[in-house]
Image (cartoon, helix red, strand yellow):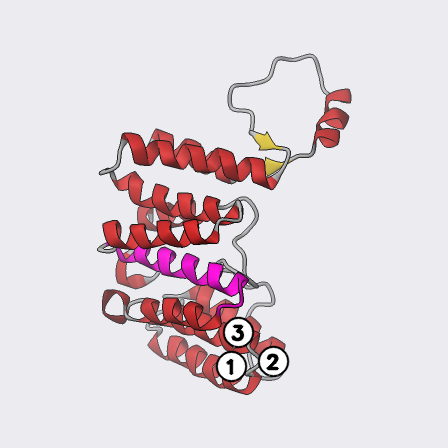
Amino acid sequence: GALWAEAVASATAEIVAEDEDAADDEGASDEPEGEDEARSYETAAARADAALTAYRRVLTEYPSSGAAAWARLGEARALDETGDAEGARAAYATAIREHGDDALVALRAYEGAGFTYEAEEGWEHAREEYESIETLDEGAYRVVGAYHLARLRILTGDRVGAQTALEALIEEIETATEGPESPFPYVLAQAQARLRELDPSAASGSDAPITIGGPGGGLPEGISPEVLEALRRAMGEGGGGGG
């Protein structure tokens, strides 16, 4: 767990160019740096390399641990950030093969693989990954897959089909809501935002949706999927609830 936390810290570290460091040093005090001072890297590539090394250390030293599943996802994302999309997809496939009984791990793996295909405009392969999400855990995450499939329609120019799919998705989530909050608030908010882009009069909801990752919808600055999932699990929002 400690090694995994170190890897996450590297993966989410700030990018600070060398000239920015020099400017900060000019105004710095003479006080010694604290041990918990946030780390930073000069380039995204350097950060990805550091994260990749750290995640692989978890996989090497504790391959059968619970942290290994999330380290494998981190490895895949770091590989993608270094430009190795094929290596990333292989790592995602390994995560599914070794840890696919955990629906959240499988969800992130299919999602991540889909994003790599999107970046290459491999629409059909991306579609297959997102369709796999729809069948996870007896359909518990179907709406996540449906949202990504609707996004693909937008990206491939099928705006009419996308609008129809988003309207159906929003209705499905809202209809399934038993309490005051949706079980998939991040999907609902993002679907409403996409629908507003297609037809401003067609959807209601927050103007500041919570994004869930991938092309056209990145995670909040500095927060990794692993950290979000760990928080969801700690709060009891894992499993079929979506979180």
- Quadrant of residue 160 in the image? bottom right
Q: What's the residue at 30%, 62% (across, down)?
A: 241
- Quadrant of residue 200 in the image? bottom right
**27 over 190 or under it: above or below:** above
Q: Counting residues from the N terminus, which is met first, the one under dot 3 or under dot 2?
A: 3
Question: Which span is picked out in magenta?
Answer: 102-122
* Element under disc 3: helix
**24 over 105 or under it: above or below:** above
The answer to whether residue 53 is seen in the rendering is yes
Q: Viewer-nearest of labels 3 and 2?
A: 2
Q: Counting residues from the N terminus, which is met first, the one under dot 1 or under dot 2?
A: 1
Badge 2: residue crowd in 10 Å (few <14, some 14–19, many ≥20): some
**Residue that label 3 marks:** 192
- Residue 72 relative to residue 85: left or right: left
* Element under disc 1: helix
In the rendered image, residue 236, in percent from the top left (x then y), is placed at 29, 52
Identify the amino acid type marked 1.
Ala
**Residue that label 2 marks:** 198
Q: Counting residues from the N terminus, which is met first, the one under dot 3 or under dot 1?
A: 1
Badge 1: residue crowd in 10 Å (few <14, some 14–19, many ≥20): many
**Residue that label 1 marks:** 162
* Element under disc 2: helix
Quadrant of the drawing holding the C terminus: bottom left
Kindly report the secondary structure that dominates the magenta region of the rendered protein.
Answer: helix
> What is the distance, in whole Å, between disc 3 and disc 1 at their CAs?
12 Å
In the rendered image, residue 226, in percent from the top left (x then y), is placed at 40, 46
Contact between labelled residues 2 and 1, with CB atoms less than 8 Å apart: yes
**9 over 93 or under it: above or below:** above
